[in-house]
Image (cartoon, grey):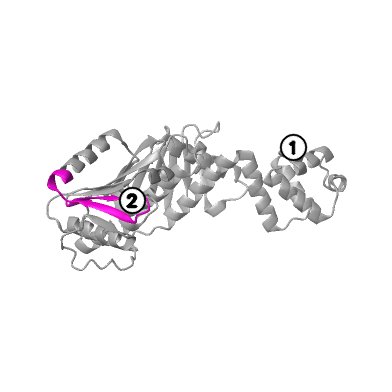
Amino acid sequence: MSEFSEFCRILQEKSGMTIYQMAKVSGMERTALNRMVIGKRLPKQEDVDAFCKVVRANEKEKAWLRELYIMEKMGKKRYDNGKFIEKLLQELRQLKESEKPVFPPLPDIGGGYEPLKPFIEGKEELERLIYQLLEKEYRRKKKTELYSNFPAKGNMLFMATSCFEQKYEKKIPLYHFFNLNVNPEKYYDADCNLKVMYYTLMWVFQKGADYIPYYTYSQLMLNDMELQMMPYYLVTAGGVLLISDDFQQGIFLDNPDTIHFYQEKMQYIRTQMKPLYQIVTAQKKDAGCKAIDIKFMEEKVRITKQKGKGRCATVVIAESSLCEAFSDYFSFLEEKKWSAHGGAHIEQTESSGYTTEERVQF
């Protein structure tokens, strides 16, 4: 029995009416009502509304039953994708470029320029070393780059680089490498690729084109990191930091030849991976565009966010599983057309469906 039919059964029992009585009052077929309650048949939308009316469901119960109906009709995976994208867009909509992020105090690095230890034990010591290493890069006069495969969810790298950008009024390109699962729906976390997109898009719209995420497909995911001794890394011009999967231990390498080897390796990895996004900034403001504007066309998703001073930034996503999730989101909105959730408005360019262009504005 599905969640939808189970909730129908609960509402029926709460009403105190039998299937026969409900059919007589509502005019619905008794067989259709029975199949709806026991989960043998998914009804039409008008039958759901009629059911809510006959059982005298309150507004909260109506809303939840409709939500369960959409989930049942779309399938849980497509429904979850739609909800995930909906949450992402709401978060992006709330990002304010004019409001500088407020960060907690930086770790005390005590001047930060004593010789660094080759082995670091403990999360606090490791975090202190990361800040020390990054600050050296932002103080460096020569052009430099950062490479890392830190988890997307963690905010330590984002917080550190953002703090030093403000402190030294300088930006350094950060190349962030990720593994995307080739079959996310078969992985224990079906949202693994969406979560990478969620956090990296937040970074992109706040840090701009100096943050460049790359991806490749792999069967190795987060739980597989435990099998590797030092799976995470941060490569700078001043050193290489190798980090355990739990961020409790680290190995620091500062031999010039070793640094050069890792930097060349990082540049080679870039050639073997694909940029997760195409980023376009400093566009002229479109007067007809809301805070977030999305277009889905030619198998690509274009997300445009208004920025301050008449500018906007556009991110283009071409990765297939992420584009599929956005397609599910548009289907989700179509199924929810009975409710203009969050003020969303859908424009459709072809009556036959969203084949050429899909667009949503917030």
Residue picked out by circle 2 = 244
**Amino acid at pointer 2:** Ser
Range of the magenta residues?
A: 238-259
Nearer the observer, 307 or 216: 216
Residue beneath the point at 73% across and 37% down:
41
Residue beneath the point at 52% across and 39% down:
328
From this view, report whether residue 309 is shown above or below residue 262. below
Nearer the observer, 318 or 218: 218
Q: Kindly indicate whether the residue at mark 2 contacts the one at mark 1 (C-beta within 8 angstroms).
A: no
Residue 294: horizontal and vertical position, in percent?
44, 44
Residue 244 among magenta residues: yes
Residue picked out by circle 1 = 40
Mark in the foreground, 1 or 2: 2
Nearer the observer, 282 or 269: 269
Sooner in the amino-acid sequence: mark 1 or mark 2: 1
Residue 356 in sight? yes
**Amino acid at pointer 1:** Lys
